[in-house]
Amino acid sequence: MTGLPAWLGWMTRRRAREVSLRALRAGDAEALARIHAQSFRLGWDAAEFERLIANRLTRGLVATDGPGGAPVGFILLSGVTPEMEILSIAVDRRRRGSGIGLKLVQAAFGSLAAEGYRAVFLEVEDGNAPALRLYARTGFREIGRRPGYYRDSAGMPVAALTMRRDIA
Ligand SMILES: CC(C)(COP(=O)(O)OP(=O)(O)OC[C@H]1O[C@@H](n2cnc3c(N)ncnc32)[C@H](O)[C@@H]1OP(=O)(O)O)[C@@H](O)C(=O)NCCC(=O)NCCS
């Protein structure tokens, strides 16, 4: 088996580079609901995103195809100092594996220490390899496990892992 064709590797790197980040805004609800629906068995609809975006404790970043382009990923957080929580992160399924998730997490954490946050928490389904890899890469460690918290596509119980990252 040969590696990826050179042009495909080039396209992938180019795509990651051309992604821009901006703050979440009110008009994002529909686009975020679309990406969420591709990513989770229980998708949040646009009304749910509108409610979240309107909540003053919610903040988020949207990755777009270049400045002003269509959303290709997002991260939503909520918290009160000193603790922040990642509510959701998802990348358009056609664009996964090109560094967008990593870029979103790193950028979202950029100003947290200066704002007085000391820890970030999240919950993730056991066995979600891409997410676990992303969180390991960004300094999260498992601090708890809730057996049977989720159901997989066959209806079987799956644990939720609680993870924490301390903010320096
Ligand atoms: C999890 C998710 C946001 C990652 O976004 P992404 O843009 O694909 O991730 P990146 O390209 O930045 O990769 C981040 C890390 O995850 C790894 N990764 C990406 N896709 C992977 C896969 N399919 N299997 C294993 N690891 C994977 C990358 O190799 C990278 O780690 P490394 O730098 O150590 O190699 C994306 O897969 C997604 O939207 N999944 C569905 C929604 C979801 O599960 N969200 C998390 C719920 S808690």
Image (cartoon, rainbow, N blue to C red):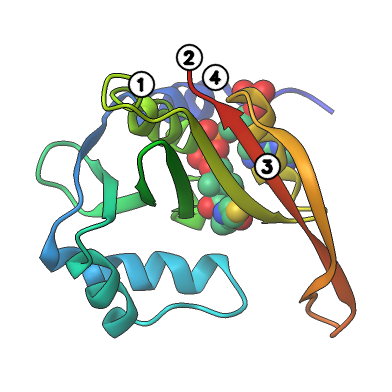
Amino acid type, label 2: Ala
Disc 4 marks a residue whose amino acid type is Ala
Looking at the picture, which amino acid does disc 3 mark?
Met
Identify residue for label 1.
113
Secondary structure of the residue carrying numbered label 4: helix
Marks 1 and 4 sit apart, C-alpha to C-alpha, by: 40 Å
Q: Residue at label 3? A: 163
Q: Is residue 98 visible?
A: no
Left or right: 111 as drawn, with respect to 99: left
- Distance from label 2 to label 4 (Cα)? 40 Å
Q: Quadrant of the N terminus?
A: top right
Which residue is under mark 4?
6
Camera-nearest label, 2 or 3: 2
Q: Which amino acid does the dot numbered 1 rest on? A: Ala
How far separated are the C-alphas under marks 2 and 1?
A: 6 Å
Of the pair 85 and 5, the residue shown nearer to us: 85
Q: In which quadrant of the rendered view does residue 140 lie? A: top right
Disc 2 + disc 1, Cβ < 8 Å: yes
Number of numbered callouts drawn: 4
Of 96 and 164, nearer the camera is: 164
Crowdedness of circle 4 by 10 Å Cα count: few (<14), some, many (20+)?
few
Mark 2 or mark 1, which has the lower sequence index? 1
**C-alpha gap between disc 2 and disc 3:** 16 Å
Which structural element holds mark 1? loop
